[in-house]
Amino acid sequence: MYRYFIAICLVFVTFSVGFAQSLVNISEEEELAYRIDQMSLEEKIGQLFMVAFRQENGKPVTTVTREIKAELQKYHLGGIILFGENFVDIEQTVTLTMDLQQAAGTIPLFIAVDQEGGRVNRFHFGTNLPGNMALGASGKVSNAYIAGNILGRELVVLGINTNLAPVLDINSNQDNPVIGIRSFGADGQMVTKMGAAYIQGLHAGGIMAAVKHFPGHGDTSLDSHLGLPSVIYGKSRLSELEIQPFRENLSATDMVVAAHIAFPELDDTKVISKKDGQPVFLPASFSHKILTDLLRESLGYDGVIITDALEMKAITEHFGTEEAVVGAIQAGADILLMPSDLPKAYAGVIEAIKTGVISEERINESVKRILRLKRQWITPKNIPRSMLLAAAQSIVSSKEHKEQERTLAYEAVTLLKNEEGTLPLTVKRDSRIVVAAPRPEILNVMGEAVLTQMKAGGHQKAKITAISYENFGELTADQKKMIDESDTIILATYSSTLASRTPGQTASASFAAALTQYADLSDKKLIVIATGTPYDILYLQRAKAYLAVYGTNSANIQAGMAAIFASINPSGRLPVPIQNQGTILFNIGYGLNN
């Protein structure tokens, strides 16, 4: 009976009934045109904005306050994006999303999150998943579908209808500071297929997908949150590699996220930066040549285009608030994500229309795309709160989902090095094991895994020592003594940038390098688990064994530990090459077995 109740609830949640009763005997296009004609200019402009409510009076926003309700109605907002601080637990989240929809008025909201799985995860109570590069390492396209479906099923019952995912960027630059393990890998065909399956999974779960970051953020060495990157490749290279996963998934996706990255070979237009008065290339998000000429006309995409967050430094350093929103609309964007100043941005669009810089017809084009998508996907407002809550409590972080998460993580573990039969590791009665990690939460999972092995073998007297090296740059005398008294060291590392894997630039990399050298000189078995990008082996080549697990979630760490102790045989294969000054040390597809 309870399963039947949940099934009925999900039918209500995922059934696309539109946001208003259809008019009789007219086509969908005629109906949309009629509804747009009934809207005021202010209402139409509001539909173009997706904003965040992260803090209010210095505290996280977890309820719909009087001020938020007033802002929703004053600006006729079309969408909200939620972040980690907006979520407390399942019941609070369901209440928040339902109250947001209730406050929105007659046209429902896009309620969005960046729930990519892995590194970018907004919930502490949902199924986190091992991340895209882990999925790529498994080599199984079906795993991307499973991941997307888990996310879709959990988001929809929480009242969220839009996932700003998947990342379709190809991680062709191992020094990329912002994509890394968020990417499925460095092979365009594989990224394309994984992305397609992930979108299908989201859709089957009842959620809209927004692919990012068009036309490709994978080959940059600058984070667009911190500055304006440029990709200097020519049109043929961009078409063959960066653009491929987007081009082949445009018919399936619901939105495309436009990147704040300059592509001079696609658009060499320059504008004067407000930062220093120097000319800068237009980012893709403000480029008519890229969003309209390329994406819409050449590639034939007529869906919704949403900018990346307009509060990112790639934009705020060089463009004023009004200039940014007007430029994005002129380029072809439909949704303006997180402008740095909503009142200024909203007023700027109105002024641009009044002065003829933007036509109302251009606004109508975007509103039509937005309303069409909402009509297709967004649920009715009359779902009983108790019904949605019951579904959420049954589905979010369910036993089935956690088991699938564990399997996905296990199938990703990639063994790159195993000298002298170091693995699998056997715990003996007199074993002395040191576990070291850059974060306490990683260390806890590692320690629990070793204790489990000790108990399983009946060796409770074996000794385990833990080192959390987050704030150490070198080995202390006490830590050297721990190593001297051990026979095996299991070292977890984490890197996402070139600096974070360069000794001397970050304390954690300096410590990991020092520990590796000391263990080697002391003839100790050193096993490395890379929990971020797999590139740490470049500076830790003295390790006896090296595994990549591609994430810091518990499932990733547990999978790595299971491989160390032979609970599983690592079957993952590198989805990216590992290079040292142009020489490939490990190619795509490389991986050992125990």
Image (cartoon, grey):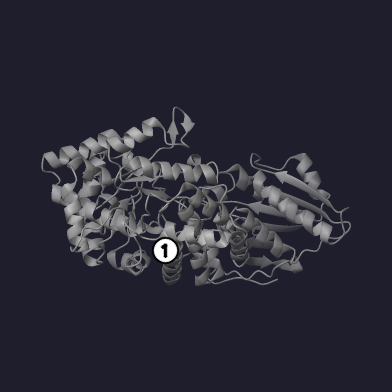
For the point 77% across and 45% down, the residue is 480
Q: Position of residue 52 (x, y in %)?
A: 39, 40
Residue 289, image x, y percentages? 21, 57
Which one is nearer the viewer's eye here, 530 or 212?
A: 212
Residue 36 vs residue 248: left or right?
Answer: left
Q: Residue at x 64, y 66 (%)?
A: 415
Q: Quick one: which residue is furthest to the front in this view?
A: 1
The front one of 450 and 504 is 450
Residue 443 position (above or below residue 132): above
Q: In this orientation, does residue 320 appear?
A: no
- The residue lying toward the viewer, choosing from 409 and 137, is 409
Q: Amino acid at mark 1?
A: His
Q: Where residue 4 sits in the image (x, y, percent)?
A: 54, 62
Q: Quadrant of the C terminus?
A: bottom right
Q: Quadrant of the N terminus?
A: bottom right
* Crowdedness near tag 1: few (<14), some (14–19) or many (≥20) residues, C-alpha within 10 Å: many
- Nearest the eye: 299 or 67: 67
Q: Is residue 581 above or below residue 511?
A: below
Left or right of 195, for residue 536: right
The image quadrant of residue 574 is: bottom right
Q: Label 1's element? A: helix
Write down the residue under mark 1.
Answer: 203
x and y percentages locating residue 73 in the rendered image: 30, 37
Residue furthest left as drawn: 356
Return the residue found at the far top: 57
Asked if residue 86 shows in the view, the reply is: yes
Figure check: 477 above or below 22: above
Q: How many marks?
A: 1
In the picture, measured across the screen, residue 505 lies left or right of residue 244, that is right
